[in-house]
Amino acid sequence: MSSLLYVKMLFVGAGIVGLGVGLYRNTVPTEEEVVAKFSPEVRQKYYQEKAFRDASEHDNKLYELIQSNAQSSRPAWMLSDSVEPACVIRERDRATWTARAQTRAQTAAQNKMIEERDRLRRAEDDQKRTKANWSFW
């Protein structure tokens, strides 16, 4: 009798866990779905920050340097005179990266203005040609 109770409870427990897993998979959005719902500005900032995090190799280099100095008798904070703290490197890279992003944004805005100007000039030329063709009326 007690073994039957254990079997029942095993199935009930597996059912509860299975229900939880199924609900989780069907209700929790993936990262791509969440990002797709962002506004374009937030999405661009998200991708920029993600690219910056992925590109920060200085933290990995610092970690490797700490590992290499682990066998020495020096403390970990006395790595080398030529090594900058990771926060300084990160902020310098962020400033450079931000300046490049601003330059790209300014260039894109200038290109958009040039395209708009050219479009308006073409429309004006088309209007002049149309008036010239129908001037005798």
Image: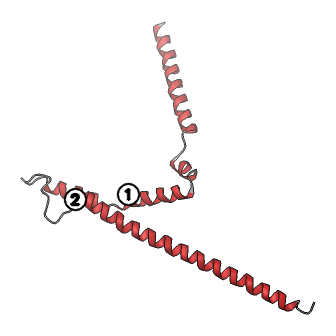
Q: Secondary structure at mark 1?
A: helix
Tell which of 7 and 130 is nearer to you: 130
Place of residue 79 in the rendered image (x, y in percent of width and height, measured from the top left):
14, 58
Place of residue 107 in the rendered image (x, y in percent of width and height, measured from the top left):
50, 75
Q: Which residue has dot 2 on it?
A: 85
Tell which of 55 and 126 is nearer to you: 126
Q: Secondary structure at mark 2?
A: loop
Q: Is the residue marked by circle 1 packed among few (<14), some (14-19), or many (20+) residues within 10 Å?
A: few
Tell which of 116 and 97 is nearer to you: 116
Q: Is the residue marked by circle 2 packed among few (<14), some (14-19), or many (20+) residues within 10 Å?
A: few
Residue for point 16% across, 57% down: 68
Place of residue 54 in the rendered image (x, y in percent of width and height, measured from the top left):
38, 59
Residue for point 31% across, 61% down: 91
Left or right: 81 as drawn, with respect to 86: left
Left or right: 129 as drawn, with respect to 3: right
Which residue is farthest left? 73
For badge 1, the amino acid type reads Arg
Residue 84 versus residue 119 in the image, above or below: above
Residue for point 53% across, 46% down: 30
Nearest to viewer (mark 1 / mark 2): 2
Mark 1 or mark 2, earlier in chain: 1
Count of labels in the image = 2
Does residue 60 appear in this view? no
Place of residue 117 in the rendered image (x, y in percent of width and height, measured from the top left):
64, 80
Residue 79 versus residue 33 in the image, above or below: below
Tell which of 53 and 123 is nearer to you: 123
For badge 2, the amino acid type reads Pro
Work out which quarter of the rendered image holds the C terminus and state it.
bottom right
Q: Return the mark for residue 5.
A: none
Residue 13 versus residue 38 in the image, above or below: above
Residue for point 27% across, 57% down: 87
Q: Which residue has dot 1 on it?
A: 53
